[in-house]
Image (cartoon, grey):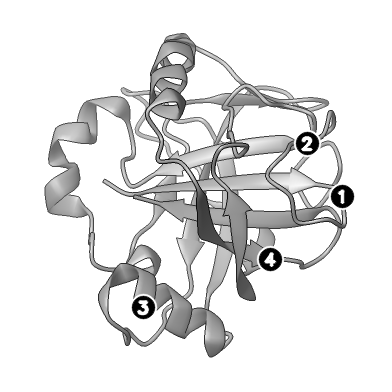
Amino acid sequence: MLGLALRFTSSPDITARAGASDQDLLLATIRRPWTMALAPLSTNHRDFLANHYFAVSPFRVEGQDGEVEFRIVPAPTAREGHGRAGSLAHAIARREAVLTLEVRPYRRVLDLRAAPWRPIARIALVRLVEIDQDALRFDPFRDGRGIGPVGLVHSLRIATYGASQHARPRGSQRVASSPGATPRERAAPSGARPHPRAP
């Protein structure tokens, strides 16, 4: 599977270090944890922008009732360039690397009445930047904008992300940056509210 990490920040600086009010949202090309075994069949691993990314488990948003789930949907784009990194760089150069962050009420396993997805933010990736991988740490529990993970699956991520970060490669690596509207969004494919408090 592929992953996508999104950080909302008010800082004008492109930096690996998170601020106290920053929000991280981590997504992957699986809808639910129990679909992970199917990821090799449902994920196009050759192209970051040919997949939908899901936050997998529920969240609570400050000031909102009930639990919600998130996904990111890339806009259709021509697939050119060598490998998924080359394809992403080509789409960014052509200003075609556009993602939509969507939200809906969280759907339980046996709930057949899925609400429609609602777009809440447009994210345009405009360039690749060098990021210090030693300092870059995404945290599913960084909730400075009021989006908090809830449930058992999220609680299991504490140990998983700790181990993953410990094993990450050292040195600088390029990630995609989106200067967009305030708060500024940065998306880093791995594998990668417009309102200050609520979607």
Q: In the rendered image, which quarter is residue 150 located in?
A: top right
Give the answer, above or below, for where 10 lies relative to 162.
below
**Tag 2–tag 1 contact (CB < 8 Å):** yes
Residue type at mark 4? Ser
Looking at the rendered structure, the secondary structure element under dot 4 is strand
Pick whichever of labels 4 and 3 is earlier in the sequence: 3
Please name the residue shown 23% across and 67% down the image: 46
**Tag 3–tag 2 contact (CB < 8 Å):** no
| Image spot of residue 198 (x, y percent) | 79, 38
Pick whichever of labels 4 and 2 is earlier in the sequence: 2
Pick whichever of labels 2 and 1 is earlier in the sequence: 1
Residue, far front: 171
| Front-most of residues 49 and 106 | 49
> In the drawing, what numbered circle is on residue 178?
4
Looking at the rendered structure, the secondary structure element under dot 3 is helix
| Image spot of residue 144 (x, y percent) | 79, 29
Residue highlighted by disc 3: 87
**Tag 4–tag 3 contact (CB < 8 Å):** no
Please indicate whether residue 174 sits to the left or right of residue 50 in the image.
right
Pick whichever of labels 3 and 1 is earlier in the sequence: 1
Please indicate whether residue 29 sits to the left or right of residue 197 in the image.
left
Give the answer, above or below, for where 191 lies relative to 92.
above
Residue highlighted by disc 1: 11
Pick whichever of labels 3 and 2 is earlier in the sequence: 2
Please indicate whether residue 84 sits to the left or right of residue 41 in the image.
right
Residue type at mark 2? Asp
Looking at the figure, which quarter contains the C terminus?
Answer: top right
